[in-house]
Amino acid sequence: MAIYHLSVKTISRSAGRSATAAAAYRAGVKIADERTGELHDYTRKGGIEYIELVLPAHEPDWATNREKLWNAAEQAETRKNSTVAREFEIALPSELSPEERRRLAVDFAKEIVARHGCAADVAIHAPGKGGDNRNHHAHILCSTRQLTQAGFTKKTRELDDKKTGEIDRWRKRFAELQNERFQENGIASAVDHRSLEAQGLDREPTRHLGPAATGYERRTGEPSTKRLDFEREAAERLARAKELGELEREAQELERSIIDLSGSLRAAKAERDRQQAQADLKTPEKPVKPVLRQEEKQTPQNPEKLAEQIKSGFVEEARKAWREEAAAREFEKAQGYQQQAQLLRGAEPKKPLLIGVKDWQIAHRVWSGKVANAENGARYSEMRAQDTLAGKLDNDSGQAWAWNKQAQERLEKEHPLLAQAVKEKHLAEQHRAKEEEGLDKALSAFKAHALKREMKAFDYGETGKQWNAIPEKLRTMIEGFNQLPKEARAVVLDRLRENWKREPEAAEKITQQLAQAEEQAREQGRSC
């Protein structure tokens, strides 16, 4: 099951951090900070699979040098508490090949650079040795200023203000890009950037330990206090609301209410009414209940929530079976250690009366150590078995993934209609979201060009290259829009949106025409 993760963090001097150090660490290179004189050398850092600088068009020549780029980003900031870089941290799906993961990360970075004009440094990291082997991820370190031929210029403050919705937009866009790659590669998975509550999923979100707790566990091999707290909280929330049998009953009822889309809806209704009528004739003593139409029939729960509950039950069964098998292995190991200790006790070296006492002392210490190791091994295996049965060792993320996969396969096998309904609903929602984004993009481009024309911005006069690059029909449409009273323009935009919603290809055509006009104007400018 594909996991979605995107977080945006800032690199600030007020926290004692620098863009040069952040870039050196993520790329695994050596960078000398010209501002402070520090040398950040991370050339021995492992796990770095790929690095690439993504720069806007017409970047200065020096920007292709990572050390010069991030030193320039540092020197562009003068305040002691300046934010010197911004990082997009994204999870890359293990279902994709390494080449596809690299393409996904770089393409996402290119879109960020194209929209905000900043520089981006992409570093793809492999999963940690002691963690989840599916934890492929990328760090996209971005400058906080636009990069032009003149160097770093104005701030990309739109990414600082939550009111602009830019971060939410990038969260949504990364989910769409990831799902597009799944479809291109024939992978039956999908991710959703929305919260679990917004998706209608009744489960707790995953929680991150953080670098301090992760580092402690890597060094000691022991669970951190933070992990133990998470497990205790999870155990307190695991009270199941209903028995699995009740969920099965509701699932069967829901599946019966889902009409097979391959048949005729009218025929399905007629067949259901006929069966109901026959049942009523067989039991005339009971009051006849009106047959509800398919649209009126009340389902026990919405498909997504019910599917998640059933799947949770399957996960619990898989977890229980794993605990019993793992505990049995530990008990078997404990029994082996006990037998070994018993054999050792019967082979205790006998103390000589006179000669060879020192040799006996050495042999006896060795023998005592072996007995102690066998006894400790038995106690440890017994403790592990008890902890396994008690659920204290369920925090293996790889094992949790296996349980989830088994549960999903079982859901698709035992409740195919329910699983298909949920999948189709997700795909429909993604399709609607993509259409809405296309409408927003078309309207935004239309309004931007109309405003520039109204303000007679550069290249938007009667002889302006940009204005004359726009198709005549679209210019007439913009002129008519600008002649309207300002209070009437919102109504016209709403009507445009409704028309384009019915004909999304029209919105796409408008967007393409305006983009082509901009490119044509740029080409003319370069040729002059």
Image (tube, rainbow, N blue to C red):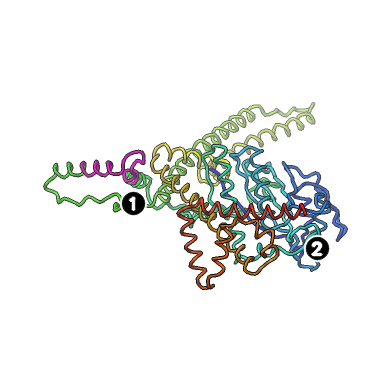
Please give the residue where the numbered disc 1 appears in the rendered image.
300
How dense is the environment of label 2, judged by Cα within 10 Å: few (below 14), some, or many (20 and up)? some
How busy is the neighbourhood of tag 1: few (under 14 within 10 Å), some, or many (20 plus)?
Answer: few
On the question of residue 135 being in view, the answer is yes
Q: Which residue is mark 2?
A: 76
Q: Secondary structure at mark 1?
A: loop
Left/right of residue 183 with respect to residue 243 in the rendered view: right
Q: Amino acid at mark 1?
A: Pro
Q: Find the magenta span and give its range.
A: 254-274
User: Magenta segment: does it hold 163?
Assistant: no
Query: Alpha-carbon distance for marks 1 and 2?
Result: 60 Å
Q: Amino acid at mark 2?
A: Ala
**Residue under the image location 49 percent in, 61 percent down:** 496
Q: Position of residue 254 (x, y in %)?
A: 34, 46
Q: Position of residue 162 (x, y in %)?
A: 61, 65
Quadrant of the rendering where the C terminus is positioned: bottom right
Where residue 296 sits in the image (x, y, percent)?
Answer: 29, 53
